[in-house]
Amino acid sequence: MTSSHAWNAPVSAARMRTAAAEFVISLSPEQRSAAVAAFDVADHQEWTYLPGPRPGLALADMSDAQRALAMRLLDTGLSDRGQADARRVMELEATLRQLEQDAGESGWTGRDPHFFWFRILGDPGNGSPWAWRANGHHLAVHVTLVGDELAATPQFFGANPAKVPHTGFRTLPIEEDFARDLLATFDREQAAIAVSGPIAPGDILTRRDPVADPALIPVGLTHAQMRAPQRDLLGQLVRQYLERVTPEVSDLSWRTVTEAGLDTVRFTWAGSDRRGEGHYYAVTGPTFLLEYDNTQSNANHVHTVWRDLRNDWGADVLAQHYAAHQHG
């Protein structure tokens, strides 16, 4: 089991406690009843990246000052790049709204950059386990804390349109480009192992399951079967996902990946190797799972997810906390 110190992030945890408290204080009683729930609420591990309402308080139902505090809370869990990517994901709802309205599609009224819900589970100030989350279409940030120890998964970022018509602006481009760069270096024997088939699945295979199942992912090519430059590219790809969170947390996450052993980390690809055509890849290791899918909306609709196989929802951190509490 991962040692307790692996998740110790005191700077991030302190910022989160402060931001969460200031956000809650700003709310009216009615808003607070929507935004705050018990840590052990029944739907704690339910989540989705599809459009539609979530438990919590939406940005649409906040004042400008409250929205700023909610976004400040979100920022405590993300790196500078993660913050920028999250905002782009949210802003894409306005782009998608216009595109769907122009196309005469009925769902355009449900697209709004303020349709993102914030929720706090438990009490950040009493020393007990607590969590916070920000959820909406194509964005799911979940953070679980026990004191200064925290977990930052499941985490989902998506983009529709991934490449905006007319402007060509791309959201989450590096997640695609690093994987393509790696795929392009494979020789025939490596490609035969890495590529599972010519057709990409229609979505990430783990979907929005509370517990991610790595057995769903094709086997793929291992780090040990790659040459040194390929291994470097694979490491860059993994860190692209991990470094969405604060440097303090991403460094701990990367250390956990390397301590578990890089040799068995696997990369698999499915679908076309041509840009603009449906494609999918996954990277899995003993402790983590990453998935990327771009098949929907004429392959202009990206889904990406990072799952920690030991510590999603803070499972490892909570297990150590409860064990210590029982024997303390």
Image: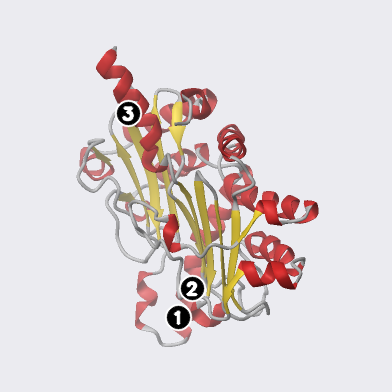
Residue ID for mark 3: 129
Q: Residue at x 39, y 84 (%)?
A: 105
Q: Earlier in the sequence, mark 2 or mark 3?
A: 2
**Extreme residue in the top direction:** 328
Q: Residue at x 50, y 39 (%)?
A: 77
Q: Are marks 1 and 2 in contact (CB under 8 Å)?
A: yes
Compare residues 279 and 155 and report the one nearer the observer.
279
Q: Is residue 207 above or below residue 106?
A: above
Q: Is residue 213 left or right of residue 282?
A: left
Residue type at mark 2 is Leu
Picture quarter with the N terminus: top left
Q: Is residue 310 above or below residue 2?
A: below
Residue ID for mark 1: 100
User: Label 2 crowding class (10 Å Cα cut-off): few <14, some 14-19, many 20+?
Assistant: many
The image quarter containing residue 209 is: bottom left
Residue type at mark 1 is Glu
Task: Single out the mark in the foreground, 2 or 3.
Answer: 3
Could you tell me residue 86's position as x and y percent? 53, 53
Compare residues 129 and 76 and report the one nearer the observer.
129
Distance Cα–Cα, label 1 vs label 2: 6 Å
Q: Which element carries disc 1, helix, strand or loop?
A: helix
Distance Cα–Cα, label 2 vs label 3: 37 Å
Compare residues 53 and 212 and report the one nearer the observer.
212
Q: Which element carries disc 2, helix, strand or loop?
A: helix
